[in-house]
Image (spheres, rainbow, N blue to C red):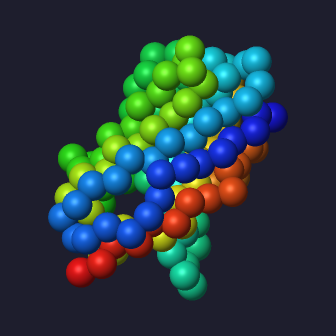
Amino acid sequence: QVQLVESGGGLVQAGGSLRLSCAASGRTFNNYSLGWFRQAPGREREFVASIRRNTGTTYYTDSVRGRFTISRDNAKKTVSLQMNSLKSEDTAVYYCAARPYGLLSTKVSDYDSWGQGTQVTVSS
């Protein structure tokens, strides 16, 4: 497993932007596909975006496509989520996750390493 620590959450007005970052520790970062998930109060954790380990192919849930951008820096062992045009419904705790040797996945159960989460609150 790899250890993950998120940062960059906060309070922002609707229409604003935030950039989340996730720093990883461990020597095998390049072997992991990475994802961002979020969980709002009273709701299940849901997929937001993912980026594949070798090709850098990305995939987004429909509600954020065109507004959010996931990226990774293998040299720095980081994965980021640039969030633009934020909406109140984007309010949640955001988690980064890692999946070893895997293809892109939207399933929580396919990821074996998780960060502690960072709160994003969008005020309307």
Residue 87 in view in this figure: no
Residue at 34% x, 44% y: name it. 82
Image quarter for residue 53? Answer: top right
Residue 22 location (% of width, % of height): 57, 41
Residue at 76% x, 34% y: name it. 2
Residue 46 location (% of width, % of height): 52, 62
33 on left or right of 90: right
4 on left or right of 14: right
Residue at 21% x, 47% y: name it. 66
Residue 78 location (% of width, % of height): 55, 30
122 on left or right of 16: right
15 on left or right of 20: left
For the image shown, how many numbered marks are present on the structure? 0
Q: Please say if 61 is above or below 23.
A: below
Residue 21 in view in this figure: yes
Q: Please say if 65 is above or below 73.
A: below
